[in-house]
Image: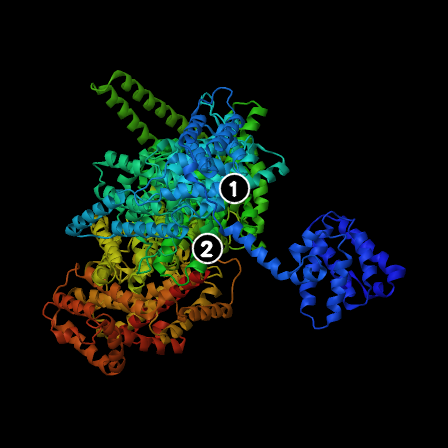
Amino acid sequence: MAASVLPADWIKNWEKSGRNDFLHLCQDLAGKPSSEVFLKDLQSALYELCWHVVQGSLKVDVAASLLADVMELREDMPSILADVFCVLDIDTGCLEEKHKRDHFTQLVGACLFCVPDAVLKERLDPETLESLGLIKQALQFNQKIVKIKTKLFYKQQKFNLLREENEGYAKLVTELGQDLTGNVTSHLVLESIKSLIGCFNLDPNRVLDIILEVYECRSDQDEFFIPLIKSYMCEHQTLCHILGFKFKFHQEPNGETPSSLYHVAAALLQHNLIALEDLYVHLLPLDSTIVEEHKREILEAKQIARKLTMVVVPSEKTDDKEKDKEKEEEKSEKPPDNQKLGLLEALLRIGDWQHAQSIMEQMPAYYATSHKAIAIALCQLLHLIVEPLYRRAGVPKGAKGSLLKPLWSRQAPPQVETFEDLSKDVFTMLGYLGPHLSHDPILFAKIVRLGKSFMKEYQSESKQDAKDKMDSLLSCFLSIADQVLLPSLTLMECNACMSEELWGFFKLFPYQYRYRLYGQWKNETYSNHPLLVKVKAQTVDRAKYIMKRLTKENVKPSGRQIGKLSHSNPTILFDYILSQIQWYDNLITPVVDSLKYLTSLNYDVLAYCIIEALANPEKEKMKHDDTTISSWLQSLASLCGAVFRKYPIELAGLLQYVTNQLKAGKSFDLLILKEVVQKMAGIEITDEMTVEQLEAMTGGEQLKAEGGYFGQIRNTKKSSQRLKDSLLDHELALPLCLLMAQQRNGVVFSEGGEKHLKLVGKLYDQCHDTLVQFGVFLASNLSTEDYIKRVPSVDILCNQFHTPHDAAFFLSRPMYAHQILSKYDELKKAEKGNRQQQKVHKYIAACEQVMAPVHEAVVSLHPPKVWDDIRPQFYATFWSLTMYDLAVPQSAYDREVNKLKMQIKAIDENTEMPLNKKKKEKERCTALLDKLLEEEKKQLEHVQRVLQRLKLEKDNWLLAKSTKNETITKFLQLCLFPRCVFSAIDAVYCARFVELVHQQKTPNFCTLLCYDRVFSDIIYTVASCTENESRRYGRFLCCMLETVTRWHSDKTTYEKECGNYPGFLTIFRASGFDGGNKADQLDYENFRHVVHKWHYKLTKASVHCLETGEYTHIRNILIVLTKILPYYPKVLNLGQALECRVHKICQEEKEKRPDLYALAMGYSGQLKSRKVHMVPENEFHYKEPVSSTNPGGLQNGPGNTGKPAAAAASATSKNEEGTVEDAEKSKDKSQVAQKTASKNPTTVNKASSSSNGSSTPNSTKGSKEKEDKEKSVKEKKEKKEKNSGSTPEAKAGGKEKQKEEKAGDNKEKTPKADKDKRKDEKKDEKSKTDGKSTDKESSKERDVSKESKQKESSKGEKTPGPGSLKSPVPRSEGAESEREQKRRKLDTHSSPSHSSAVKDNLNDLKDSVSKHHANHSTAPSKTEADKKESEKSRDRSKEREKKEDRKDRKRDYSNTDREMSQEAKRRKDENGTSSSKHSKSASPPDSPRSNDKDNSKRSKSTSKDKTDLAKTDKTSGGKKESRHDKEKSEKKRDSTGTKEDKKQYPLMF
């Protein structure tokens, strides 16, 4: 500092410039304010100057003259210089150099004229003073100082009490106790007191004590005594000591400090006559004692809470109660007097907030205000402070309040006039008051009303600057609500009015702020104060008491108790109630009913508590088996739906919670949304709807409400409006829809990775069902404008929001309907015309205007290649229509109308009902009836308009660019399959839409092909469905089967609805339809064959799914089978096959998977009840009569479908379709059979009268063989002449067939080959039963007819005849063979639906079923000749087939031991006396397996020769073998054709 203040250059050049520079520096420093910083700088400068003098670098007289000039700069300069000399005195006294000390002494001596002696005597040492000559002797000076100090500080002044006269004190008391209302002033009384002291020799301190005593007695006379004391006293300390002695006097063990003394002390503190620090030390108890007492109270409160939550034995309870009573008695004894709190109360009462705040800061939080007197005093002070603002802004309209007088003291806090003034003292006071505002409910209401008024101003403020300033006040109000209002409500005993008042304030906050307040209240506030800890424990204890006794019968009294408890402590109560509901879901109904006594605030707190319980991170939302949603979540979801429907609770928080969960990829909580929408809007999504309900759901809104839902929808108007408003106000409607639509796939791919498949399916169903339910709610409750404004176009939904197409159209569909209707109304108003035709044209114009942008928008949804098969117009039409547009549910309307008529009739007949009520009910029913009839009429007109529109559009729906097969594939893949599993109504819609497209005679749409693709292989679709999707898919199949069954059951219906329709054309590449060519149409009988094939396909798929052992396969197929039960199975043997497999499932799954067992048992029972409606196969479709032309004519079971219907499964063009070709080929077969029968009447007659096949094919002689050959050659020639299809293609087909036979024989274990084995078994067994009546001639004729039949059928397969499928471009043999090779590859390719084990099981099933039906035919005993012939044939075949037979037997018997044992028994019954050896022999009649092997070997040799079949075979047995081989090749081609179809199947899932 010295270097900076006085540089060395100044000393060197002192005379020239240094002196002036230093003087200027001192002037600058002296001119600045008298702060410590500048004062130190001045002292440092003077010190440096003096130090240079001491060092000798500056002369004494030069420095003295400069210091004399400096002294004039400030008044206190002498004192500053004296301080510098004092420091230098100490510094130089320690130095050894004597000359420096001399320099210092000289300097001080030279400055004596500018520094007073008295100042120097105070600052310098006595020795220095002696050397300066200011004192004579230092020793004497020291002694004198000691004496003076002793006299001042240690010597007591004695009064001669005996000289005092009592009369003086009496006079003094009289003076002080006189009436002060007149002109008596403190100044006059003070003069009298002085006179009395002088006259009667009174002690001044005792006089002061008496003044305080009188003031204490007359504590209301502050205006008199305060000025008196101010004038009388000389020192503050004296007054403080006297007061302290007074307080100490009352600190005796049983002493009680009077309130008047607290008042006197507070008044003296307020007027600053004494200091709080001086008085505070005289007061008891000590601060440390207060802290210990506070801690002890907290511990006691926690112990009480622990005891209340513990389970206590009854005997222990009584002991505890006694102890508690003893403790309470001890506490009831008078506590020691707390003088600090007494003083605090007095300060608050007179309005001295500053001193009161100082005392409260010394104590623990809320300790002071926990004493009721202090809390009330503080509340009174707050009343006075907020009075002006409350009168201006807080008083409700029409209310009158008593005005409060302001405090007279000027030292009291100022009253608040504006909201900004509240932040000065009021918020601080409320913070100290805390939960103890409960002592003054009126002040509580005032603060709440001020908050309400502030919030209204805040919300109405439009200027941003003003709003920013008010933000700090908003945060203050929130803090007050958190720290004061809610805790105070806790301590108020069931004050419902305060709860409602507080809700009026809280409802102005957003729910986020409110919920945060509730969270603080519930989780933190109760632990901050011992009193609140006790209250929490008592609330839980009381809640337990109530919940134990809550039942349906005592809902009212229990509800009142719950309401009473909830007014003060809703968070604690609801937390306990919710925990109980999570354990016991049967409490939901009584709890919901008992909540009717709650306040609005309590309902809001309940919503928060529910959300907090749902979001509890410690709770698992899955059960321990990880396959189902936890029961606690289901219980809370049910509670949510019931509570939010019944009571007016804000939904925003709950809806936002569900939205946030979906954003996070969690779909469990959609259960809550599902329940809320179901209960509040009455919209329930269930796949268990009855047919009547489903029919009602296709009508208008009124019909839906009356007949479509399980519950009463009319009572949900208010609650659905609340839900809608909440969604719109918080903009959650569209986000929820989009998140649910996206989450469906998220459940599988994101959320379902580690979850059980069963749970993933349930979550997917829950997500999908909630989406459908929510979408239906929005469509039915939102106005047209609201809906259109919120839902974007379908291309934006799909491309930007990545919404799946089915969900996007589901959301957009109501929008299209609204837009079309509004546009239609506009056009009607623009041109007034009542003719129906004009209305239709206007409707079509409206549709074109609305749907044109949609047609353009959907193009972007799929690759351009898609639109080569179907037009965007067709795609958009399919997705935009609903069942409401396609048909009027006439029966549903009639049913509901009849119900209402019956109700009206019942009301009329009811004599007990009051007339007034009867009239109202009748009016209601009549109004409803009129509404329904009007709605029906409106829908009828609408459907007619839509059908007219579709009739005009249909020609442009499907393009002829590609094959019908590809068109149907795209239709199934993009339209039918995605929508049929979307909802139950959509499932019905899809089936009806297909029927409608057929009825409209839509060009290029093959109905037959569409139905075939739907029924042919359902395995993949069923396996990939969830449980609910299975129900919907089953409903779809049921509706499809319903249509098919209607056509199948009546020829007239078939001819009327299908006979002349392009959908039943059998030429796929025909671009047009003339309707005149009957040969290209599928006739009725062949259609019946096709339907039988579809039933077989369904059986095959069902059996496969049941045999897999996979949970989802079995569950889904059982669900589907249950749904299609009214129309399938219709054939007896198929039903028995299903019954067998389902019975097996029941046995296997009884212990393993109970849910599958329950499904299987349910289906099994229903299937048995339907058995009476099943018919044999020959009644289901036409079967050729029992003759040699059709050896297996009477066979039933899955193995027979290859004959009439499934025999045509192999295709002749690139887009071969098994169904239509089946029909055509079977038609050709039947024609050929009839011709053969007509040419060979003898054969037919004999064969029909004898049997269905030869039992001894190898017993014919050579002459008969020749005759057979000749006849067969003749038959061939005749057939070739008559057959118009004898073309090179047919020859190529024949060669191709031989190749197929060769290749087919090399294959092992193909399904069709196994089927043929089973066929051979059936044929041989039938021939065995008819062997007795067969002679040699009939055998020969039968063989001839069989051979001709085989050749004709083989040619019929490859030769396009007049009624067969015909390709416009002839194909070469090479192309045909390549295709057949591809088919073989496909056939050998393994797939889930064609495993070898399943094939064997299926074939065994067919075998057992066919044998079961074979038992119904007669079995006459054999002749001896027949037995010998069978022995010979057995010997011939035994050696050749021994090894192969063993292998085949091992394979077959390992799979079906049980079936084989039954087979053996059946053979015994058929043969009568046949032994077990015969039943196991390898003869053709007894052992189909060996015969089959024999046939296969012989057919290999014949296929190598490539010559005429009749020439190659040398025995009738050879003929039979060739017939079997051809049938095998046909079956293989059938299987490859169907497999190729499967490759083309769209896999949607």
x and y percent of residue 933 in the render? Answer: 38, 26
Q: Which residue is more in the foreground, 992 or 1410?
A: 992
**Residue 1282 percent coordinates (x, y):** 40, 58
User: Callout 2, which amino acid?
Assistant: Gly
Q: Residue at x 20, y 71 (%)?
A: 1457
Residue 542 image offset from top left, x and y in percent: 26, 43
Residue 604 seen anywhere in this rendered image of the structure: no
Report which quarter residue 1135 is drawn in.
Answer: bottom left
Local crowd at mark 2 within 10 Å, few (<14), some, or many (≥20)? some
Tell me: residue 1242, above or below residue 1424.
above
Which sits in the foreground, 621 or 1197? 621
Q: Secondary structure at mark 2?
A: loop
Q: CA distance from mark 1 to mark 2?
A: 74 Å
- Residue 31, percent from left and from top: 77, 48
Q: Residue drawn 30% across and 47% down?
A: 537
Q: Residue furthest right?
A: 16
Q: Which residue is mark 1?
A: 236
- Could you tell me the amino acid type at mark 1? His
Q: Quadrant of the C terminus?
A: bottom left
Dot in front, 1 or 2: 1
* Mark 2 lies on residue: 665
640 or 880, nearer to the observer = 640
